[in-house]
Image (tube, rainbow, N blue to C red):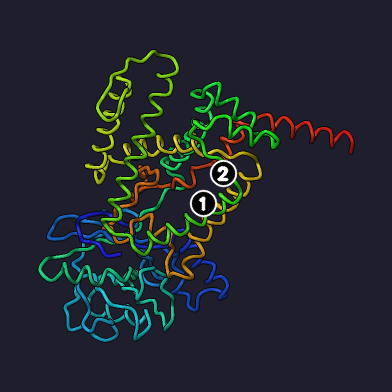
Amino acid sequence: MSFPLGNRRRVSATLPFSFLVALSFAVAAIAGGSKSPYCNNPVQLAMVKIWVDGDEGEYLAGLTASFGATLPEEKNKVPKLPAVFSNPLNGCSSSSSKLSGSAALSVRGDCDFVTKAKVAQSGGAQALLVINDKEEIEQIDCSGDVSPNISIPVVMVPKSVRDDLTKTMANKRVELLLYAPTRPIVDISVVFLWAMSVGTVFTASLWQEFGISEQTEKRLNESSSKESSDAGTDSDNDQETIDISVKGAILFVILASVFLLLLFFFMSSWFLLVLTVLFCIGGVQGMHNIIMTPVTRNCPQKTVRLPVIGEVSVLSLGVFLFCVIFAVAWAVHRRASYSWVGQNILGICMMINVLQLARLPNIKVATVLLCLAFFYDIFWVFISPLIFQQSVMIAVAKGKNTGGEAIPMLLRVPRLIDPWGGYNMIGFGDTFSFLVCLLHLHTDLIEKAKRVWAKGILCG
């Protein structure tokens, strides 16, 4: 997870910080508490802001040690410190580099963390950053003799910091500011993201009734019974709907896993560009259908004959051009801070369109698909780090090997009141809740279930 300093803001830990902190406390509790009365500091999520030649750049995240000084919550209470690498780099013996008044950096290993802190403090350092030997960050333990004289904060940062700062500090002045801002319990962006996701599925379920023709509605009602399923598919071949079977649901999850692995291993800038083009095509089609559905149902259309295409509605052509311009404008400015608005609009339109095309014929298929999707998320988020050394789902969502640009197949909202910034995101797979659409289209099944349940109560 390397980063060019000053280009973007990014949290460098792979696992969620709340999980890391909770895990650290759990391990400490199992171990029976700390070994020293001076090793009882609460674990803090540290923000390390970076200045390059006086210009504020990005920030990175770290975890504080259980000993030493704690970090303040407000950045105006701490000074900026020049970054200096210890020499030797392991920080286990007196440094030949001048550490006085600096934020010393040393790598993990060769001696315990307490020794590194004592050496850095004896050299005059105001803070110590320990660079981990892997990208994940961990709580710094208290191995060694902890004395009350350690009065500087000690923070662990990811492995990539070493190479990035080495390149930057070769010809530029780098300053660091360390503090620990508190995160809000609930960010308003999470509520907004939840509302968008639920609203998308709810709109898709109602859109079937709003834009569906009488012929298609008749077909859906007929195909809900097993006896008329074959006749239903033969009677209306011109409808663009796909019935998903149990085998299809299993195949869908398998293909999704394969595609996720392809993204994980082969994700690059050109691969992301291909995904962006496909996303724009799907968004244009979805937006066009959503705009034209109420229009074609209620308004007469003037048509014009075009070469190759043939006869086409004038209004449909104008709407299509508008949708293309919208998608192209988003693609050009997709790295801008406001691009999340256009991305969400295109994504919602695409999802509503897909939810019209893919139809679950019964509750059995819906149950199988949703259960498989549930275990799919659990495996690729929480279990995959045991196999691939990092969460496959999180790595792909954050844009592995793409310079930090995330894939467009997700809804995202900026964290408005979180001092860490960034975005809250939810993937399209989590929003594709076919069950809601199914239950809306098959309300007769619900009524039958109620009658069966009531009959069982009366007869029981």
Please tell me the numbered disc located at residue 252: 1
Give above or below for 396 relative to 92: above
As drawn, which residue projects farthest toward the right? 459
Q: Viewer-proximal residue, 258 or 451?
A: 258
The kind of secondary structure element at disc 1 is helix
- Residue at mark 2: 244
* Residue 251: % across, % down: 53, 54
Give above or below for 182 relative to 35: above
* Residue 304: % across, % down: 28, 19
Give above or below for 373 relative to 223: below
In terms of sequence position, does the residue under pointer 1 or pointer 2 come before the other?
Answer: 2
* Residue 383: % across, % down: 51, 65
As drawn, which residue projects farthest toward the left? 171
Label 1 with label 2: CB-CB less than 8 Å: yes
One can see residue 17 in this view: no
Q: Residue at x 26, y 44 (%)?
A: 334
Q: Residue at x 37, y 79 (%)?
A: 113
Q: Which quadrant is home to the C terminus?
A: top right
The kind of secondary structure element at disc 2 is loop
Q: Residue at x 24, y 43 (%)?
A: 336
Q: Amino acid at mark 2?
A: Ile
Q: Quadrant of residue 64?
A: bottom left
Q: Amino acid at mark 1?
A: Phe
* Gap in angstroms between the C-alphas marked 1 and 2: 9 Å
Q: Viewer-proximal residue, 410 or 45?
A: 410
